[in-house]
Image (tube, rainbow, N blue to C red):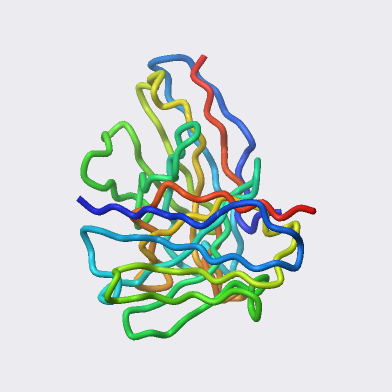
Amino acid sequence: EVQLVESGGGLIQPGGSLRLSCAVSGLTVSNNYMGWVRQAPGKGLEWVSVIYSGGSKHYADFVKGRFTISRDNSKNTLYLQMNSLRAEDTAVYYCAGAPYFNSGWFDPWGQGTLVTVSS
Amino acid sequence: QSVLTQPPSVSGAPGQRVTISCTGSSSNIGASYDVHWYQQLPGTAPKLLIYGNNNRPSGVPDRFSGSKSGTSASLAITGLQAEDEADYCCQSYDSSLSGWVFGGGTKLTVL
């Protein structure tokens, strides 16, 4: 059974940094396309970033230059380094298997970790 | 404001059929990118419900079906059950944004 378990969320002040982790079991992170999707309170889902098995990375425009996706193959873990956080980054962040092509889908999903950006 | 437009809410009585629409544009659904649907039960993570417009992952009942035409897609649920009460969200790819896009979600209430 595939499991994705996020951690690292919490309350952070505007301008601060946070690193989210996603521990994966049942599939090899380095051999798969992985990504992050977020959901602001009461809002819809938003794609944030993906990393492909070959190592290329892609970001939504609203996080470019502020967020960095990475992985640790030895720990089979996906990360999202978030810098210069803004109030509008407040959301539940989900780790998920990313689409293998433009017409693809996100599956499976972790349970999410809440990030609250507030002073 | 989401790139894909969904009605905020729909409702139906047990046993009835309901549909949820997902309207896009020429840069996403209309550009022949596939549409996928997710079910999000209260307080839980999204779960893939329909992929590739009309395909069900293993374990998803055949009461759930998807369709796509032009710049829109629809999710149909027949034989509505109490446990279907959830948020439903569509997803596609947008060539103008060079990224994946989601609908704002539709809350299904089973009366």
Q: Position of residue B41 (x, y in %)?
A: 45, 33
Residue A89 visible in the picture: yes
Viewer-proximal residue among A19 and A55: A19
> Is B15 rendered above or below residue A57?
above
Q: How many marks?
A: 0
Residue B103 visible in the picture: no
Q: Position of residue A39 (x, y in %)?
A: 58, 51
Viewer-proximal residue among B38 and B15: B38
Residue drawn at x 41%, y 18% is: B82
Q: Position of residue A111 (x, y in %)?
A: 42, 46
Quarter residue B76 falls in: top left
Residue drawn at x 19%, y 50% is: A1
Quarter residue A55 falls in: bottom left
Residue furthest to the right in view is A119
Q: Position of residue B77 (x, y in %)?
A: 40, 31
Residue drawn at x 61%, y 31% is: B9
Residue drawn at x 31%, y 31% is: B63
Viewer-proximal residue among B80 and A113: A113
- Relative placement, left or right, of A42 versus A95 is right
> Is A93 rendered above or below residue A72?
above
> Is A53 rendered above or below residue A99?
below
